[in-house]
Amino acid sequence: MYSGKVNINCSPPLGTDGYYSSLRHAKQLVQKVIVSQTDSPTAYRSGDSFHDCIRLVLAKVSTLDWTTVDNTLQQLQIKNLLRRLPGVIRTGCLMSADFYTKDSVPKCVVQPAVSSEKENALLRFEVLVEDHPKWLQCWPDAGTESAFDSIEDTSIDFGPSVCDLDGASDEGIHFVLVELFQRYLHLSFKDATEKITADDFAHFDILLSFLVHRRKHKVALWMKEYLGPDQFVDAWNEIEQSYLAPFEALLQRCTHQCAKCQLQCMRSTLHASDKEHDCGLATKANASVEREITHAVACVAFRLLQTARSTVS
């Protein structure tokens, strides 16, 4: 369009009542937006919504389609929303679909899905806990609110598996849950030598529930801003059932005993029956022990070498 290669053949149906009625209606809308840009509900909610509308209008004009743009625009918005939804569910941010299946997403390729202070305030623990009082019942510590809010939503990447809910990987979800449990241990100041108890797993499940519900709430805020309140109400039930309910189910932790130790399983409750219950911590512990042994051997070898050199000299 900017290079001048877009040709628009505009041939309005002059002489018809509908055409002049549409012009009067358009004039009223423009005047309303100009007079009260801040309060007018007809103003564009974002640059994306304005771009979508202009693109649609140009397409309809080029095909001599003089029907209303409302229905077509709504279909276009829903299509774009479904295209972006997996990225918002995974990272809480908007990003290119090229990164949906990547193991990691660089911070430079994402942009905030929710940016206003008012909307971010609705994602705080004190707001979300009103719908989930069991969080405080199961974790009644005085610092719960500040501890939970210290974990920024955009710092949580639920992994590529949540971008393909139908073909979600057991190992992918397992990896995410183990990593989140490690963050919980760090958050609770759990020393590496301390025993992991049943309370730790119960508290982690509360933290996990908070992180998942906060992400779901963020998706709802983003959808409402993108679609507008009226269209959001129509689309929410289907989106929730088709995308967010499976997402929540996928991130519920299996509580069976690990097949390798006495700890609890860190796989999804939906993991395949042929997969062993696995806490995921034994592998990390073994790797840590191997590193310590390697370091100890290296230290002994270095000391022997120093002793040999001093003897020779």
Image: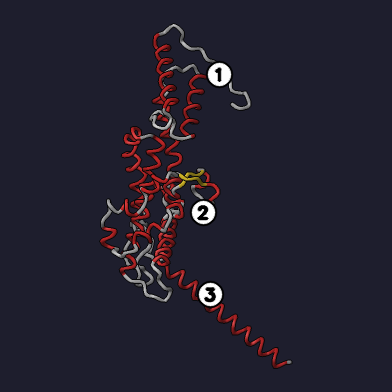
Badge nearest the viewer, 1 or 3: 1
Q: Earlier in the sequence, mark 1 or mark 2?
A: 1
In the image, 282 versus 91, the foreground residue is: 91
Badge nearest the viewer, 1 or 2: 1
Give the tally of numbered discs. Answer: 3
The numbered dot on residue 291 is 3
The numbered dot on residue 210 is none
Amino acid type for the residue under numbered disc 1:
Ile
Q: Earlier in the sequence, mark 3 or mark 2?
A: 2
> Does dot 1 land on a helix, a strand or a loop?
loop
Q: Mark 1 highlights which residue?
A: 8
> Does dot 3 land on a helix, a strand or a loop?
helix
Q: Mark 2 highlights which residue?
A: 104
Q: Are marks 1 and 2 in contact (CB under 8 Å)?
A: no
**Structural crowding at the residue carrying mark 2, measured as other residues with C-alpha within 10 Å and reported as few (<14), some (14–19) or many (≥20):** few
Kindly give the residue lying farthest to the right in the view shown: 313
Q: Earlier in the sequence, mark 1 or mark 3?
A: 1
Residue 186: image location, x then y, percent: 42, 66
CA separation in Å, label 1 and label 3 = 68 Å
In the image, 174 versus 42, the foreground residue is: 42
Amino acid type for the residue under numbered disc 2:
Ser
Residue 117: image location, x then y, percent: 42, 46
> Does dot 2 land on a helix, a strand or a loop?
loop
Q: What residue lies at 32% left-to-right and 60% top-to-bottom?
A: 206
Amino acid type for the residue under numbered disc 3:
Arg
